[in-house]
Amino acid sequence: MELKDLGFSNWFKEKLSESQYSDDTLNLARVVSVNKDNYRIRNEEAEIQAEITGKIMYGAESNLAFPTVGDWVHIQYFNEDTFAIIHEILPRKSLLKRKTAGKKIEYQLIASNIDIAFIVQSLDFNFNLRRLERYLIMVNESNIQPVLLLSKRDLISPENLKQKMLEIKSMNLDCGIFAFSNKTGEGLDEIQEFIKPGQTYCLLGSSGVGKTTLLNSLLGQNIFATSNVREKDGKGRHKTARRQLTILDQGGLIIDTPGMRELGNIGVDTGLNETFKDIVTLTQNCRFNNCKHISEPGCSVLEAVEKGELNAKRYQNYLKIRKESEYYEMSYLEKRKKDKKFGKMIKTYMKNKKST
Ligand SMILES: Nc1nc2c(ncn2[C@@H]2O[C@H](COP(=O)(O)OP(=O)(O)OP(=O)(O)O)[C@@H](O)[C@H]2O)c(=O)[nH]1
Ligand SMILES: [Mg+2]
Ligand SMILES: [Zn+2]
């Protein structure tokens, strides 16, 4: 196997010149899974165990400094190439992350260097356009191309599927959409064909929608454990516990992730505008430059909702997510202020201490 089969491209090659280790003493490998302080990395030959240097471990100012699944790393081999130390993380082409709940501004890294994100929703209980919008924001924010995968099509009638497709079409998404069933195999060929060698994909979506089952379908074997969903309400227990990068026989790399319970505190900026392009276009005709599109006269967004040209629920979701992110940004700035004050306090304290 060559590095390009593992997803190494010119983009990364160019970044090598920025590396502190350009003298060829280190080797390249890709992180395939993370387990606390242990990493599994994959090189041209095999998958091996790795650990990070003390410099990375103790020098890290945030989670961003630690390797995550999908990262390209510079490593040094030990024990006849059966173990490695990670010295450096190469720049990331893309990074999926979410803000963690809590007082500190911190991120949970989901995966890196993804080209295409498969957003999976099952067509039975899980299908929800508002949730889809949230995933789209996260993916668009990270500069990753989204593709929508609708699973369990065996569970709904063809008429119902048609109806749901129309609902999605009305959102004017510019992303690929595949409906499929792991059970009957319908639609799997199209997904298979879509997946290209050397490209990295990730599976995102609620628990129980069939992400891991799809991965097994693509592998042609039941390699990874899947869960048993209660038929009644589609609720299941989280099955996949950690993120893992898998190499498909026919080329292409897939990162499976555990289902996310909620998508609160997603970073919202370009992702919001990208996902709600239709609304952004409408705002250009609002009478006031600072229109908030809530109750202002001459608001084109409100007009479009009244005329039925813009789906009211889509509009409400836009406002809701915008409000959440404004709130988040506000508390972020407040935290910054507080940090500054604290810094000053320490400085004054040190000064006084010196002079006494
Ligand atoms: N009827 C039907 N059931 C499916 C389909 N795909 C998956 N399932 C079932 O759905 C359940 C959950 O599948 P998983 O693949 O474990 O779901 P997951 O998205 O990986 O869930 P987490 O790992 O918890 O995030 C299993 O019982 C699967 O057999 C499908 O296309 N049709
Ligand atoms: Mg799973
Ligand atoms: Zn407006």
Image: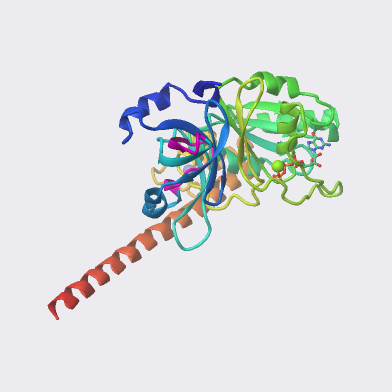
Q: Position of residue 34 (x, y in %)?
A: 56, 45
> Does residue 6 appear left or right of residue 218 in this picture?
left
Question: Can you see residue 158?
Answer: yes
Q: Picture quarter containing residue 6? A: top right
Q: Nearer the viewer, residue 38 or 97?
A: 38
Q: Nearer the viewer, residue 57 or 129?
A: 57
Residue at position x 50%, y 38% in the image: 79
Question: Can you see residue 179?
Answer: no
The question of residue 65 being in magenta is answered with: yes
Residue range of the region highlighted in magenta in the rendering: 64-81
Q: Residue furthest front?
A: 80
Q: Nearer the viewer, residue 323 or 93?
A: 93
Residue at position x 22%, y 69% in the image: 347
Locate the N terminus and report the quarter of the image it occupies.
Answer: top right
Q: Position of residue 219 (x, y in %)?
A: 72, 27
Q: Position of residue 287 (x, y in %)?
A: 42, 41
